[in-house]
Amino acid sequence: MKYESQRVAMPYFIFALILFAGQIVFGLILGLQYVVGDFLFPEIPFNVARMVHTNLLIVWLLFGFMGATYYMVPEESQTELHSPLLAWILFWVFAVAGTLTILGYLFVDYATLADITMNRLLPTMGREFLEQPTITKIGIAVVVVAFIYNIGMTALKGRKTVVNIVLITGLLGLGGLWLFSFYNPSNLATDKYFWWFVVHLWVEGVWELIMGAILAYVLIKLTGVDREVIEKWLYVIIAMALITGIIGTGHHFFWIGPPEYWLWLGSVFSALEPLPFFMMVVFAFNMINRRRRNHPNKAALLWAMGTTVMAFLGAGVWGFLHTLAPVNWYTHGSQITAAHGHMAFYGAYVMIVLTIISYAMPIMRGRPYGNGNTAQVVEMWGFWLMTISMVFITLFLTAAGVLQVWLQRIPESGEALSFMAGQDQIAIFYWMRFVAGAFFMAGLVVYLGSFFIKGEASPAEEVRGPATADA
Amino acid sequence: MAERFTKSMARNIYLGGSVFFVLLFLALTLDTQLRAMPERDNREQLTEDVVRGKHLWEENNCVGCHSIMGEGAYFAPELANVFDRRGGGDTEVFKSYMKAWMNAMPTNVPGRRQMPNFNLTDEEIEDLAAFLEWTSKIDDNDWPPNIEG
């Protein structure tokens, strides 16, 4: 850690991991409710648990992105953060607002929550992933604007690197597109169209810029490869992400009202969306092969490789499986969608945040070359347990989805099973998914446990001449 | 990557590519929203009842369990075509079905998925029914494949 103000990333990372644990607890509740329908009913109905599960995910990833940014930008700019105090204030504002919102979901009936937060004045609630009360949405907007101001001021006064430019472009996109969460026309078809401007253009657009920037930064640090090479790769990857992903939004417009030309545009462009993820795999492994140093933080390197592979599988391969319109006509809104969503979010965004945490946390804790061997071995156990569990969660949900489509979608009306009759037939896969989820939880406990193990690694060993000054 | 392919070439592909596709996306959005959607989304039938029904749909977080036009949660049945599935395409039949259904919740059958009772008035249930009926008439390229959703 070269600048003292980078340390403000620490509370963001710690709080992100706490929320991550909460997300998984609610994931297990949901998984059980799929097979024991009245589990925790009426105390925590499915819709409440799901809202907590998905909103915790979004919020902890935002905490992770913010922590990553506070860590990376001063070092890239070669200057202290513009205002560490503002970063701390925003941390508490966001943490308190986020916690209150989650508690509101859990302890206040949703319609009452809508009522007391005056949703009628500017109705934005009750849409998937955007369930937050309008006041919380305004809070998120304010926090993001102040955060970007703090980061922007830092970046402007220091060295301009491609990593910083791409990261900040991604964050500006994140903030700008969030404004669409306030647009909720009474025409459902229009509402849905612009809802995707937040949801798709975040996760299949600007978040890929953030992911690419974090990955590039960590690879510079871990491999010592020249920045010029890494930045060129980064540009090509994000170019592919936006060239395919923007029109790729069309794969969501197939069945919600927009005209038929989206069937073609959405199919063709989203079929290309795996490309940037494939390039990230090639990029990471290539840079590691060309490394100029053996960095002792092997765990961080494992996360960096893992995130590219899992993002490619989850976002790329599992996305492609059901993105062509003739396939999607059958699979849209089935468990196949859920399978894709789980592995894509885990592979791309959970793992990239855990990558930067794995790299930066030891440094902030006074272990400049990473944790000691025992802590790293335990962390890598956490990596494999969570990752393999997620592979199985995805496989079981895919099996459930294929059967669901077979029973409920493919037969003619009259022959097809009803939704609930179909669900009963595939319960075995939901049970197996629940077991895989329990293993994921075990992996998370192991992973979190690794933070409590003492000891640090010794300095990096150079393999091909000294690494660049950046590394 | 060959050395002839420089970083500034990569940057230009990124900048040029993203600007081009952002503009194309905006143009397509204009065409979709201004030209195509008025013909497809059944907006002339979008009455006050439908608007109130959409608010009820949102304020009770229906999408937390159900999907509508395939979007939402996958815990409970698709509802964009429930007007055809349960109402047989008849407004009055659907309204009475909705009242009977909503008031019978939760079933409290042990082990079965439970839908809460949202304590809606008869008028509110009619608004919700109007919203679902209106939604069922959006031209969605003939999705879902069959009546089961």
Image (tube, helix red, strand yellow):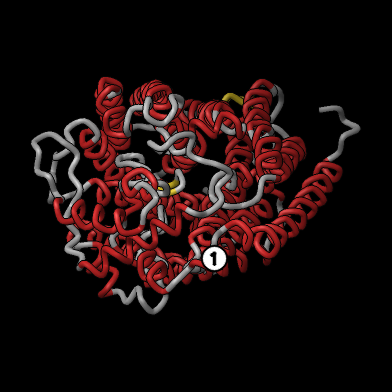
Q: Position of residue A303 (x, y in %)?
A: 49, 30
**What is the quadrant of residue A286 in the picture?**
top right
Q: Looking at this view, is A102 or A451 the one in front? A: A102
On screen, A142 above or below A52? Answer: below
Q: Amino acid at mark 1?
A: Arg
The quarter of the picture where the N terminus of chain B appears is top right
Chain label for disc 1: B
Q: Position of residue A180 (x, y in %)?
A: 54, 64
Q: Give left or right: position of B11 versus A23.
A: right
**What is the quadrant of residue A399 in the picture?**
top left
Q: Position of residue A283 (x, y in %)?
A: 67, 29
On screen, B47 above or below A323? Answer: below
Q: Give left or right: position of B24 versus A50.
A: right
Q: Looking at this view, is B99 or A402 the one in front? A: B99
Residue appearing at x 71%, y 54% in the figure: B25
**Helix, strand or loop at mark 1:** helix
Q: Give left or right: position of A38 versus B89.
A: left
Residue appearing at x 81%, y 42% in the figure: B10
Q: Is residue A460 visible?
A: no
On screen, A154 above or below A48? Answer: below
Q: Pointer 1: what residue?
A: B43
The quarter of the picture where the C terminus of chain B appears is top left
Q: Is residue A55 visible?
A: yes
Residue appearing at x 76%, y 57% in the figure: B23
Residue appearing at x 50%, y 31% in the figure: A330
On screen, A35 above or below A164? Answer: above
